[in-house]
Image: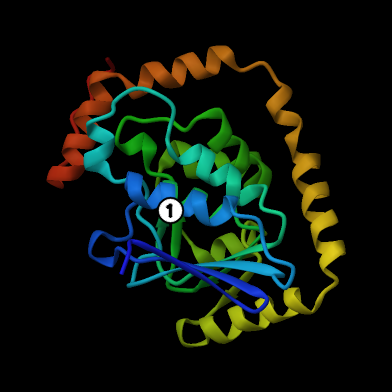
Amino acid sequence: MGKVEWQVDGAVRSIRLNRPEKRNALDAEMIAALQGAFTQPPGSAERVAVIRAAGPVFCAGLDMRERAARPRGASPIEPMLHAIETYPLPVVGVVQGDAIAGGNELALHCDLVVASTAAHFGMSLAQIGLAPSWFLAKKLMEVAGPVTTRRILLLGDPLPARRLYELGVISHIAEPEDLEREASAVVQRLADNAPLSLKAMKVLIVRQMAFREGIDHADVDKLVEEVRGSADAQEGIAARLARRKADFKGR
């Protein structure tokens, strides 16, 4: 079995992260497979795509060992997330466990999120000396608003799924034993809706949110790149891999 498995069964395109022994951390192979699953156009019978994950953790973000070997350059996750965001049909994320950093972004780039009350969502980048790109921060602002985005980014502590549901950041929540039943009901509702309507609405929503891309942010991109290449970032990643507290020097 591969690290990412996907198949089409009638109206549903099902994608599953399958690297539970590494908390479904996204390596280059998984990112490429996910992007491939969402760049292949849907068939005429398809109505909805669903992302799930094996094991107790939905996704712990980017593989830290790969990230340590690539201190600079654009995040490889962005084209994959863009493919999910612009996929012609609704995408449902079924989040059974924690969704952290890139895993948080993976979930929030889905159109609807059905999460277990056992799950937590967060962006721990500040705790390891990194910063999100314009593209990643834009998604947080869209779905979470400025106050919650500040809390998620500046503190870096995960928030429980129930709290994000109360804030309107995720669309559905269920107790762990009811998660699949709730997810199946949401997927069936989407599959029963008019496909042309769904496609038009998906484009409409994505286009409505695209205005932030027009804001000049070259200086922000430069700043984020400097953060990614900093000694603090190297220290933060090394500390996270060694499971020790980072000693940041501000350089």
Which quarter of the picture shows residue 238?
Answer: top left
Disc 1 on helix, strand or loop?
helix
Query: Which residue is found at the position 40% from the left and 43% from the top?
Result: 156
235 left or right, relative to 12: left
Query: Which residue is found at the position 63% from the left and 74% from the top?
Result: 12
Q: Is residue 240 something one can see in this rendering?
A: yes
Q: Looking at the image, which is closer to me, 61 or 227?
A: 61
236 left or right, relative to 219: left
Q: How many neighbours does mark 1 have within 10 angstroms: few (below 14), some (14-19), or many (20 or more)?
A: some
Residue 125, given in percent of the width and then of the height, sits at 38, 38
Residue 40, given in percent of the width and then of the height, sits at 59, 54
Residue 118, given in percent of the width and then of the height, sits at 43, 73
Quarter holding the N terminus?
A: bottom left
Q: Is residue 101 something one can see in this rendering?
A: no
Which quarter of the picture shows residue 110?
Answer: bottom right
Quarter holding the C terminus?
A: top left
Q: Is residue 180 above or below residue 82?
A: below
Residue 66, given in percent of the width and then of the height, sits at 25, 39
Q: Looking at the image, which is closer to me, 193 or 249?
A: 193
Q: Is residue 232 above or below residue 219?
A: below
Q: Is residue 98 above or below residue 36?
A: below
**Amino acid residing under circle 1:** Ala
63 left or right, relative to 141: left
**Residue annotated with mark 1:** 33
Q: Looking at the image, which is closer to me, 12 or 128?
A: 12
